[in-house]
Amino acid sequence: MSKKKLVLIDGNSIAYRAFFALPLLNNDKGVYTNAVYGFTTMLLKVLEDEAPSHILVAFDAGKTTFRHKTYGEYKGGRQKTPPELSEQFPLIRELLDAFDIKRYELENYEADDIIGTLSKQTDASEWEVKVITGDKDLLQLVDEHVKVSLTKKGITDVDTYDLNLVEERYGLKPEQIIDMKGLMGDSSDNIPGVPGVGEKTAIKLLKEFGTVEKVLESIDQVSGKKLKEKLEDNKEQAEMSKKLATIEVDAPIEIKLDTCGYKKDAPAKVVELFKELGFNSLIDRVDSEAAKEAELPSEDIEYEVLSEITDSDFGSEAAVVVECLEENYHNGDILGFGIVSEKGKYFIPTDVALQSELFKSWLEDETIIKYMPDAKQATVSLAWEGIKLRGVRFDALIASYLLNPSDSSHDIPSIATRLGLKRVSSNETIYGKGAKQKVPSQDELSEHIVRKADSLLEMVPTLQESLKKNELDVLYYDLEMPLSIVLGEMEHQGVQVDVERLEQMGKDLNEQLQKIESKIHELAGTAFNINSPKQLGEVLFEKLQLPVIKKTKTGYSTNADVLEKLKDKHEIIEEILFYRQLGKLNSTYVEGLLKVVHRDTEKIHTRFNQALAQTGRLSSIDPNLQNIPIRLEAGRKIRQAFIPSEKDWVMFAADYSQIELRVLAHIAQDDKMIEAFNNEEDVHTKTAMDVFHVGKDEVTSDMRRQAKAVNFGIVYGISDYGLSQSLGITRKEAGAFIERYLESFPGVKQYMDDIVQQAKQDGYVTTMLNRRRYLPEITSRNFNLRSFAERTAMNTPIQGTAADIIKKAMVEMAKRLDQEKLQTRMLLQVHDELIFEAPKDEIEKLEKIVPDVMEHAIQIDVPLKVDYSYGDTWYDSK
DNA sequence: TCTGTCACGC
DNA sequence: GACGTACGTGACAGAG
């Protein structure tokens, strides 16, 4: 017969862990639920992983226990349970009742004692016991049929201790854990132990003598005079501490184990409670049917499916959904169209729509006002069908992003949920995800698409109002919306790639890589996977015995910083660095880019994400064309593969010089910095002069390098730690460096102080064009979170304004190219740089227009400077 | 399929 | 004094 499995959960301990591990969430009724939520995720994981036949959750009862009689100060000095946590205990009890899980508490005893007693009552031949807790004390219960899972980080991440693991971690038997506590004490429970004895000493003593009593009997044999004295002076305290740490295994428990049986299927009450608590994401873990049910819209919707378009009067204003299943809309088919307006609600199948000239001209009609979920996606999807979308007035994706960039999704179902509007199924519910993604039945599909359009139309006024209220409407209508169309055109246009050249580079790289690989294997004396940090670590730090510089949480760190420090220790290091460099080029750039080249046109079509980066920057995916190598020559050559799409054209690139620092000078109104830019001084040299208090001619290249790093740090909002890393100095030195910098530029210092104050007051910061970023953590008690928010407050207005500026330049640029009837096409944006392809005979004009537009995109108190260049490939436009 | 490590750009 | 430290995207290894 297989054994019965009993799970015993230390309720208080897990609730505490959950409370402190998770941010203070509350549900829509304003009730704090973070501890309940954490407790629930832990419980679900245990139920899934352990599949227990019996389960019980033990709680502490009352304030005093028998331990207080032994030692009045037991658990003294402990912080009171925060009320935000106390109020969650009843909910946890309710949760367990809903699951039909037994819970138990006993006057005068702690949860530990209940768990101890129950686990030791079980018969090893019949039972397997698993204890779940965050309290190391319970390790004393481990034996051949009792295992203890200790939470590590968070709540669901645990280490499960059996006899071997206790031995391995502590070198002790489980029953010696109490002896260890007796000697070292436990500050959280206010158990004194022997002052001056910590974990290391305690373990050493116990390994030698076995128990507290034996240690105390043989004090004269203990090595170390001081230690002897301490033990002698605290004999009684040690014995008492051991007693306090000892879990009672004979508590007068009335509950019978056979009443703690657990049936696998979660009752309906659980789903009810989850809904009440707002734990929607957990519902499908207990009942996937119920989850789908909860997700589905409740009200019916009526709409017309058009099998033919005889009349294109869908109203002068309409919500339009151009549905595309593929996340990458460049190669995805349109699944259908949804239109909702005052005229009615319609679904138009793709073939019907695309064959209708009437419908096409409706889409292209500038005077028909269209509200869309994602105008850029629609622009591109339609562009691939030869249709030029016009008349877009509203884009929900961008509206939602501007209102709060930190929301993780801005699709219609998500926005609808946030605004508390009509429910729309999530795309994932309808289409599935990953390998299971598929197009649903025609009915389900059309209904989903129409519902999205319906919901969109409903949310437009609310979003418009919010934009206005937050003074985001100008940014929205004058900048981001027009930009989305410009970006759509850039994406659809694509960049021509010299495939042959890339392939040749790939061949060369592969040859080189093979050679280096065998050299490395030879130097290591063994064949291994160089790309595996794990294997590489073993070779370097175990086989070759190189000094360990840094560890990661999974093993040895082998990153470039570490390898750089080991360079003169072994000749293999240099080879590895070279191997990494070439390997990166080959896999990410050569192979990666070749994978995404359109086979017919040999062009690459990236997608710019306009609603992701918290600062207002764009990002680029599939492929990322914003991180093509430039710093090292070998990598830079990749740019030779990016070429104009027409014969006798050139690549034309223009970039802002020091845009962030110029923005900083303006925003901070720092006189010195403004002057430096007005006089066209080299800003890094100027910084070095001020920070090091030297004249211009005394600035060494190293001083300039350091000054540059500080400027870089200011612009990116890095910490003293970050600066210390990039300069290879200590954190203290870096801190002092930043201090000196701020002394040198008092305007900047003033700005930094003011902006943090302002962020604390408003809860957000803004850029020059009013882009917002909320920083709720700026008032956090957690030093880390708060510091991070403070740096973000300083940095976002700078980086975000720079993003505003180039975006403005892009919209303006598109307009100018159109007005001047130039053939030149804008292709890419790389944060402070624009890349075009242009006919040779337009170069002269571009040399005037491009810098002009970019430098005057916005008016600030220092000049904006643009450098430009052109050539046969992107590489040559340097 | 997910997580961790590493590396590229700005 | 600890905490874990600019933002993005993507490749690969290794564990589940």
Image (cartoon, coloured by chain):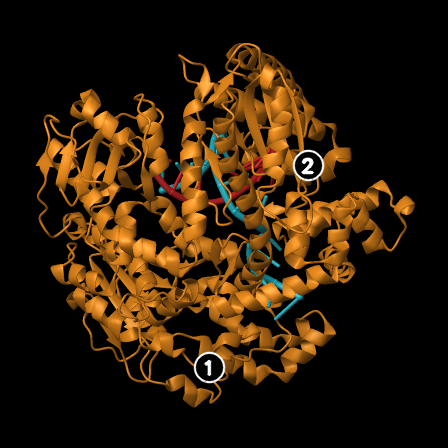
Chain colours: A orange, B red, C cyan
Disc 1 packing (10 Å; few <14; some 14–19; many ≥20): some
In the shown orientation, is residue A713 left or right of residue A766?
right
Kind of residue at badge 1: Lys
Tell me the residue at 57%/42% (across/down): A857
Q: Which residue is mark 1?
A: A75
- Residue assigned mark 2: A563
Of label 1 and label 2, which has the lower sequence position?
1
Q: Does residue A332 appear left or right of residue A678 in this picture?
A: left
Task: Please give the chain letter of the residue carrying mark 2.
Answer: A
CA gap between label 1 and label 2 equals: 48 Å
Q: How many numbered marks, from 0 up?
A: 2
| Chain to which the residue tagged by mark 1 belongs | A
Residue type at tag 2: Leu
Q: Position of residue A156 (x, y in %)?
A: 37, 56
Asked which secondary structure carries label 2, the reply is: helix
Q: Secondary structure at mark 1?
A: loop
Indicate the quadrant where residue A533 lies.
top right
* Residue depicted at x 44% and y 38%: A483
The x, y position of residue A799, in whole percent, is 58, 48
* Label of residue A791 in the image: none
- Within 10 Å of the Cα at label 2, are there few (<14), some (14-19), or many (20+) other Cα atoms? some
Residue C9, compared with residue A550, is above or below; it is above
From this viewpoint, is residue A830 visible? yes
Residue drawn 40% across the image and 54% down it: A403
Rendered position, A701 above or below A297: above
Mark nearest the camera among 1 and 2 is: 2
